[in-house]
Image (cartoon, rainbow, N blue to C red):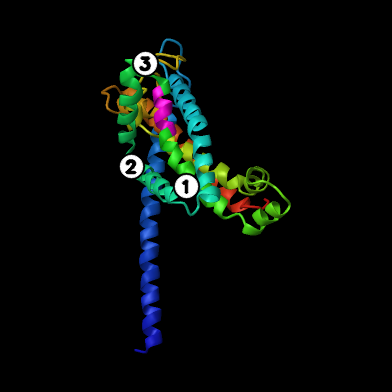
Amino acid sequence: MSRRAIRKFINAVALGLSGIATAIGLFFLGAILWTLIRSGLAGMSTPPPGSSGGLLNAIYGSVVMTVIGIVIGGPIGVLAGTYLAEYGRTARISTVIRFVNDVLLSAPSIIVGLFVYELLVVRMGHFSAIAGAVALAIIAIPVTVRTTEDMLNLVPQGMKDASTAMGAYDWRTITSVIYPAAGSGIVTGLLLAIARISGETAPLLFTALNNQFWSSNLFAPIANLPVVIFQFALSPYPNWQQLAWSGALLITVSILILSIVARFLVSSLGPGGRA
């Protein structure tokens, strides 16, 4: 057998194994989605009067804590990523920041929950939505830092030099040239951060806990979808288990939509590009 035939044979085997691995992954992904849709759609109807209720309080709590968390963590992550990309690119402190950010990016979220529990919950004397939002903000920060730095580094150096040559200060170049050019990438990072924190359960068990009733008090325990799913899935009551499936479907669909939007922004609105 010639060397060319051997290479073609090895290439065919590698492509075949890659295709089989892809098919297996897609099969299990499809099985998970089908199970969620089949089991979750049955509980998506509005509960009749006098019934045990639904997930509105949990949906409200999750939305509130996610919004507060991204409002806190988003600006911090964007500013930190801006420093790493524009001001401290070669500074020693930047190396330390990147290392710490990578550690936080891969750290178990339960550690963040324990940290916020000791920082806020113990001192406040009770669980609260604010503590949960702070935990989610800490989780969102490293995602935003990484994506912001990467997107700013993709902006052509010529655009920055042209702004500087016209006499613009660094802050003016960043706000008027670099941010607009990398705007879609920064927004994508924020969307990915939202998708990252919207399904977190472990940190909320130590911070916001749960609430069986409707509550809009940010300084009290509040219901949220991840913890409700965890508790209802372990319950012996069929209607609670049905609500857990419905909550899991809601979170999955929400994260899927955010991921699709983020990928669309990256592909159609690259730095300096247009749709």
Q: Which residue lies most toward the right here?
A: 166
Residue 239 in picture, x, y percent from top left = 34, 22
Residue 25 in picture, x, y percent from top left = 37, 54
Which numbered disc, 2 or 1, marks the residue that appears first in the sequence? 2
Task: Judge the density around disc 3: few (<14), some (14-19), many (≥20) Cα neighbours within 10 Å.
Answer: few
Residue under pointer 3: 212
Which numbered disc, 2 or 3, marks the residue that appears first in the sequence? 2
Residues in magenta, as a range: 131-137
Inspect this view and state whether residue 257 appears.
no
Quarter placement of the N terminus: bottom left
The residue positioned 39% from the left and 74% from the top of the image is 12
Gap between marks 2 and 1 measured at Cα: 15 Å
Query: Is 136 included in the stretch rendered in magenta?
Result: yes
Task: Judge the density around disc 2: few (<14), some (14-19), many (≥20) Cα neighbours within 10 Å.
Answer: few
Residue 17 in picture, x, y percent from top left = 35, 66
In this orientation, which residue lies closer to the viewer: 102 or 66?
102
**What kind of element bears circle 1?**
helix
Residue under pointer 1: 146
The residue positioned 63% from the left and 50% from the top of the image is 269
Query: Is 57 included in the stretch rendered in magenta?
Result: no
Which numbered disc, 1 or 3, marks the residue that appears first in the sequence? 1
Residue under pointer 2: 107
Kindly identify the amino acid type of the residue bearing the numbered disc 3. Gln
Q: Quadrant of residue 130?
A: top left
In this orientation, which residue lies closer to the viewer: 115 or 27?
115
Q: Mark 2 and 3 residues: CB-CB less than 8 Å, in contact?
A: no
Kindly identify the amino acid type of the residue bearing the numbered disc 2. Ala
State how many labels appear: 3
Q: Quadrant of residue 154?
A: bottom right
Q: Quadrant of residue 215?
A: top left
